[in-house]
Structure formats: C-alpha cells, structure tokens
Amino acid sequence: MDELLQEIKVLPGVVGIFVSVDKPDIIFSYVPDGYDHETLKQMGGSLQRIIKMNASCRLSVNSVEMRFPDAMVLVKHICEGALLVMLCETEANFSLINMTSNMLLGELAMGVEKVRADPDAALRAISAKKAGSMDFAQAQNEEPLKSAIPVFQDALARAIGPIAAMLVKEIVGKWLQGGGCGQERFPELVDLFCQEIGDVPLEKEFRAGTARLLLR
C-alpha cells in the first residue's frame, strides 16, 4: 500500500495523500504535520458518507473534487468502504494526478483486500513505520543525514541548479515518510533524486557524486 501511495505522493503539487478504510478502521497516510489520525478519520468518514449518499440515490459517483482558495481535494472510490484522498496545491497538474491515481486503483483495491484479510498485520506495519520515521528538521541534525545532506545538495545543484536546496528538503522529507533514515536506505533516496533530475547523463553524474555515501 505504501509504495502505491508514494507513486502518487511524489507527483508535483501533491501535498498529502491517504487511504481511508472502514471495517477495519485503518488509515494509510503521507500527509503534512498537523493532520493527525483523528482528523484524517473524520475526513474519511465525511467523504464516505458523500459517496454512500449518491449510491442511495442510484447515482454512480466514483470521484469527487473539492476546490478551496488555497488547495484542492481529490477523492477516488477504491472499493466498498475504501477511499483514496489526495490533498493538492491549486496549481497542480490534475490531469497527471488523475491519470496516475486511476491507473493504481486496481492495485489499491487488492491492497485493501489484503488489509481486511489480516488487519492486525496492517496495524503492526503502520506502527513500525511511525516508530522508525522522523521529520526533516530533526533528521538533518542527526547522522547519517547530517553529513550526507551537503553532499546530496552539492551533487543535485550541479545537475539542476540553485533550486537544489529546496528540492533536497522536499525529497528527503518524502523519503523519511517511508521509514527510518539509516544509511542502508540511501540507494532508495538516490533513486528519488534521479527521478527528479530526469536526464540520464545528469543522473549518472549525480550517482557518481554521491556514490561514497552508499554502504559497500
């Protein structure tokens, strides 16, 4: 489930994302600080009622878009009792976000089936992820990231220019949401940087410039 959410979370303009599942009541999320479990649970419950209300009126509603002055919420119906909710910037590429999320709905539905088959295992996985994760502000002041971030930033600046510092914070933050910040996860972080670079020769140069950070 987490890998599927990450595929959407890394899209430009996606600020946060979560899957709301009822029976069992479980939330899978990658959201900004301030969105606690209860907040997401309330959002999920309200959105579930919107979908069910349309179903009771014999209307087939599989997605909902909610526009606000400074944000937009996209909702996709995964399967009975499960929703995908995406929190986006107003200038986001909604065509790309819709296309990507629609392609993943089938896999998300299978993920929900697995969760319902063994909810205890899903809850243990969520607890382990929370225990091993930290935010960028904390991680940048602790090893191994304290020494690694300047190297990543310098190599990224050579590839894409002065916006590197901003992107390092964003990409490392996303990476931290996937688990701990141990050096053994650096290859995954390097791959995320290369996805952002999007140019094969520059990716090779970036990998060469950061190779010394990887465990051998």
Image (cartoon, grey):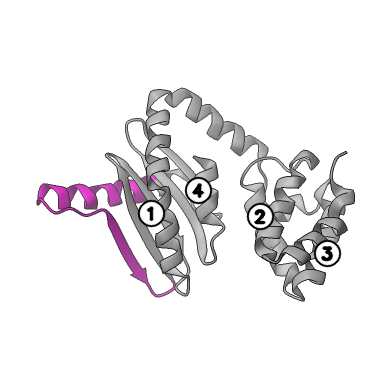
Residue depicted at 49% across the width and 29% down the height: 123
Which residue does the numbered mark 2 point to in the structure image?
173
Question: Which tag, 3 or 1, sits closer to the chain's start?
Answer: 1
Alpha carbon separation for disc pair 3 and 1: 35 Å
Tell me where the magenta segment starts and ends, as one range: 41-70
For the C terminus, give its image quadrant: top right
Give SS at disc 1: helix
User: Please, what secondary structure does the residue beneath circle 3 have?
Assistant: helix
| Residue named by callout 3 | 155
Amino acid type at image mark 1 = Asn
Residue 20 appears in the rendering: yes
The residue that label 4 is drawn on is 5
Q: Is residue 142 visible?
A: no
Lateral position of residue 4 relative to residue 140, left or right: left
| Label located before the other in sequence (1 or 2) | 1
Q: Residues within 10 Å of mark 4 (few under 14, many from 20)?
A: many
